Image (tube, rainbow, N blue to C red):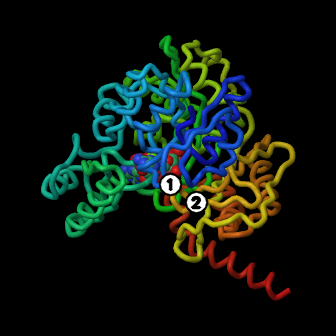
Amino acid sequence: MIANRGEIALRVLRACREMEIETVAAYSEADAEALHVQLATEAVCVGPARAADSYLNQGALLTVAKASGCDGVHPGYGFLSENPEFADACAKAGLIFIGPSGDAIRKAGSKSAARDLMKAAGVPVTPGSDGPVSSVEEALEAAEAVGWPVLLKASAGGGGRGIRRCGGAADLPAAYAEAKAEAAACFGNDEMYLEKLVLSPRHVEVQILADRQGHVIHLGDRDCSVQRRNQKLIEEAPAPGLSPALRQAMGEAAVKAARAVGYEGAGTVEFLVDGDSFYFMEMNTRIQVEHGVTELVTGVDLVRQQLRIASGLPLDIRQEDVRVRGCALECRINAEDPEADFRPCPGKVEFLHFPGGAGVRVDSCLYNGCVMSPYYDSLAAKLLVYGGTRLEAIRKMRRCLEEFTLEGFPTNAELAYEILFHPVFVRGRCTTGFLDEYLPALLDFSRRVGEREADT
Ligand code: ADP
Ligand code: ADP
Ligand code: MG
């Protein structure tokens, strides 16, 4: 059973079909016409559009899985994918949860507790509070100890939510209250911890695979530094410009991190890179949006591996078999309006054309005439390219964005196009502050190009 929607539901379905595994799509009323619903062996509606009533409705999902004779449940990303109670409930109902055990999710899931675990395992972590901070006073004390500026972060956080920057003691009460309120609203859990704000770091993460026989390998790194408000926009593999020693140390640290929580399945260990130092940030216990760039440079189908591991098979790749070749880029195309502070603006797809050609991959559940629902996140398509060199990949992505056509609602595609020409990006020097710094200039440039086109 696929307990998710959108492009990731389709991605899982495609892997299942190639492996001749029958699928049940558990969908909400808003997704009755979704592509994965049409392509699944069976499809069952589990509730109304609101995620709480459908994609997060554990009782309904388990009932459908049992009644339709499923062996396992793939949770995709978001929704219930990092919910340890759901993983346990699947196991209790005799269903294989396609992901790590509830216990491993619990260990990695509290970002504050995970830091302690990683420290003990010898993985470097960002300087920060020892465990959670439960009041403004405690936060102040921890901040004074690590030094300003700091980031207040939700222990249960994800998707860039529940994070606030804080420059000094005067800002702390407001930042603490805001982050706590956002965490309560997004995750139903407002526990906070605190980290030193690393200035101009890069976000580099390592993909890992672990089987149920105790083998753990990593599949190299990805750079996801092009972010807006802590949310990723463009990702690439491998991370540009890492020294071989740093790369190897991060790969080994990721394997240690996975072992420290007793990990099984596909997962990601996220690090901040500051010069030649790196710090553990969090572990994502699921398939990630940007997994495709790793697939393109390693030739490993990560969803297929998830399904193999879940069915008890040992890994069929050894660490020494993993070869990273060339360069892959991904642009997330979101239904949002960069001109209106990135307001989500999904709607009906009036016309759609996806690019193709050698080394091009598009993961999207959109088709001509379909409607993107306002109930869910605004990811419309992922454009991925593979090139023998980084420059080749950049040129290919520019060409793809020139071809890509989506009419019906605004997207961030033009912004992505501008980024691909920015000298900082082209040189592979982006830090997580890149987009915030250059966004006004990038938007201004695409506006002027638009006006020039309108004139001619
Ligand atoms: P990735 O690194 O895979 O992009 P993100 O943290 O951006 O991971 O989250 C992936 C997807 O899951 C995004 O669409 C995000 O909105 C969603 N998501 C992440 N965490 C949560 C959560 N706790 N609850 C609901 N959705 C989430
Ligand atoms: P989430 O669970 O929401 O993905 P993360 O802990 O992965 O949260 O942080 C999201 C982003 O915030 C990172 O990719 C990075 O850009 C930024 N960030 C997180 N922690 C720090 C830090 N200590 N210093 C600087 N930037 C950070
Ligand atoms: Mg993260």
Above/below status of 102 relative to 273: above
- Nearest the viewer among 94 and 340 is 94
Residue at 61% x, 75% y is 441
Q: Which of 70 and 10 is in front in this view?
A: 70
Q: Which quarter of the image is occupied by the N terminus? A: top right
Residue furthest to the front: 67
Q: Name the residue under label 2.
A: 373
Q: Where is residue 12 in the image (x, y as percent from the top left)?
A: 63, 35
Q: Looking at the image, is 245 positioned above or below residue 446?
A: above
Do residues under tags 1 and 2 come within 8 Å of each other at their CB atoms? yes
Q: In this view, does 132 lie above or below 245?
A: below
Q: Does label 1 or label 2 sit earlier along the sequence?
A: 1
For disc 1, the marked residue is 49
Residue type (three-letter) at the residue carrying disc 1: Ala
Camera-side mark, 1 or 2 = 1
Say whether residue 274 is visible. no
Q: Distance between the residues labelled 1 and 2?
A: 9 Å
Nearest the viewer among 294 and 409 is 409
Q: Would you identify the image quadrant in which residue 372 lies?
A: bottom right
